[in-house]
Amino acid sequence: MHTSTSQSKRALVIGLTAAVVAAASIIDAGAAEAAACRGYVGLTFDDGPSPTNTPRLLNALKQNGLRATLFNEGRYAAAYPAQVKAEVDADMWIGNHSYTHPHLVQLSKAQVDSEITRTQQAIAAAGGGTPKLFRPPFGGTNSTVKSVEAKYGLREIIWDISSGDSSGVSVDRIVQANANLTDGQIILMHDGPANTIAAIPRIARGLAGRGLCAGMISPQTGRAVAPS
């Protein structure tokens, strides 16, 4: 009986020691990652989700240790809710990119309101939460758009650098555009182009080589920051 009790105590001590070591390893890994990040940039991808393009994009991002903000169109979120869920499961952030991708500056306030609120609802219904970030299509904004954004507590996010990927530019051009990012800046890319997905491994290596990490976009400042 005494031997059994001693063995149980030793097993408990060994188990607790292993748990402490494992926890310390996790903390050390987190600290090392934070130390390696001398700054954060916002990788953004517009115009999804899609049942063909989004899985490829998410796989490329995950395989290369990158997180991104995906500005979804409401019509596609409503049509492909499984892809919105996949974005969440891949640990990405989801933003609002209007429902039908119109030039909002040409619309009435009521129309702008409809574009934004229907997208908020579609993303939430698909399991993507309620977005806090909004990117107007084409970067077009005015006082009417801003007033509707404010009504829904949305931070307007444009971009510092455009990759040009929607115009069919080369992988090299997309990689170079990302190479110009500095701490806090945001780059515009898109869900669909094959060259964008092909560029992701090189984008990841380039950022790592400069001590930059893919961060979240702060709803308070609109700049890229460390993930919370």
Image: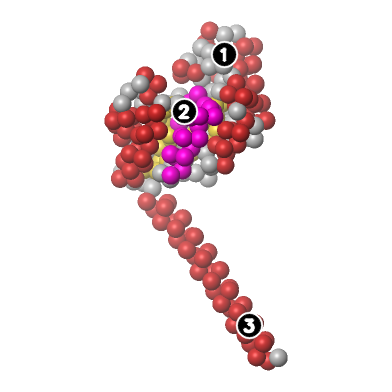
Residue highlighted by disc 2: 191
Q: Amino acid at mark 2?
A: Asp
Q: How many marks?
A: 3
Q: Amino acid at mark 1?
A: Thr
Q: Which residues are magenta?
A: 44-63
Magenta-colored stretch includes residue 45: yes
Residue, x 63% and y 25% (percent of image)? 78
Numbered circle sitting on residue 9: 3
Q: In the visual, does 53 lie left or right of 129?
A: left
- How far separated are the C-alphas under marks 3 and 2? 56 Å
- How far separated are the C-alphas under marks 1 and 3? 69 Å
Give the answer, above or below, for where 175 lies relative to 35. Answer: above
Q: In the visual, does 6 lie left or right of 34?
A: right
- Expressed as whole percent of the image width and height from the top left, the position of residue 146 reads 55, 19
- Asked which secondary structure carries label 3, the reply is helix
Q: Are marks 2 and 1 in contact (CB under 8 Å)?
A: no
- How far separated are the C-alphas under marks 2 and 1? 28 Å
